[in-house]
Image: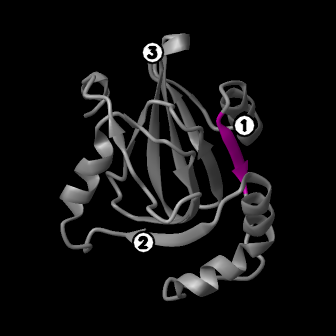
């Protein structure tokens, strides 16, 4: 279950899925919770994981024109984990929506919505689905647990491509 943190409002936290969904949807960000159609094990393959969520994933991909899905699995023992983390920690945008479904572990998306003059974060955990619209300024942190297993969905074969803003805003919110 996700945790929404309103960073510029006294670090207020919201953990009600309905309240999180309402807050995110009002800002154009899709937040949902999905359940697997079968029990999964840590050792399950990408194919098994994608099949377990096909009942949710296939209709979403078809409706929104996505052509590619994969599973990313990073953890403390992943080679170059700090370099991987650093790649996501700088504020950036994308030319397509960033779609993630958290199969296991957790990671925190930080949003900088300039038109609303607000910065907030959403800690995504097992069962959380998020779609960040293209062009939204954000960054992502996989610390402190360093464990993210997530389904990623793309419109193009290139996959994750960041356009870094170099604004430095993220530095004010990083521990």
Give the x, y percent position of residue 130. Answer: 62, 48
Name the foreground residue: 166 vs 10. Answer: 166
Badge 3 is on which residue?
8
Locate residue 134 relative to residue 139 in the image: left or right.
right
User: Over which residues does the magenta segment extend?
Assistant: 29-33
User: Residue 19 falls in which quadrant of the image?
Assistant: top right
Mark 1 → mark 3, Cα distance in angstroms: 19 Å
User: What predominant SS class does the magenta segment belong to?
Assistant: strand
Badge 1 is on which residue?
21
Where disc 2 sits, the SS reads: strand
Snapshot colouring: one colour
Badge 2 is on which residue?
73
Give the x, y percent position of residue 85. Answer: 27, 53
Judge the density around disc 1: few (<14), some (14-19), many (≥20) Cα neighbours within 10 Å: some
Name the foreground residue: 83 vs 15. Answer: 83
Judge the density around disc 3: few (<14), some (14-19), many (≥20) Cα neighbours within 10 Å: few
Mark 3 → mark 2, Cα distance in angstroms: 31 Å
């Amino acid at each position: 279950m996700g945790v929404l943190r309103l960073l510029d409002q006294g670090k207020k936290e919201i953990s009600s899925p309905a309240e999180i969904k309402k807050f995110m949807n009002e800002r154009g960000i899709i937040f949902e919770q999905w359940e697997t159609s079968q029990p999964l094990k840590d050792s399950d393959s990408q194919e098994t994981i994608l099949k377990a969520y096909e009942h949710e994933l296939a209709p979403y991909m078809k409706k929104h024109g996505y052509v590619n899905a994969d599973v990313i699995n990073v953890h403390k023992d992943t080679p170059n984990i700090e370099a991987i983390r650093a790649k996501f920690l700088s504020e950036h945008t994308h030319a397509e929506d960033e779609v993630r479904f958290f199969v296991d572990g957790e990671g925190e998306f930080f949003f900088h919505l300039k038109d609303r003059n607000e910065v907030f974060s959403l800690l995504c955990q097992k069962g959380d689905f998020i779609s960040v619209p293209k062009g939204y300024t954000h960054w992502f942190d996989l610390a402190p647990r360093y464990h993210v297993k997530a389904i990623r969905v793309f419109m193009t074969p290139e996959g994750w491509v960041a356009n870094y803003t170099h604004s430095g805003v993220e530095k004010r919110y990083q521990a």
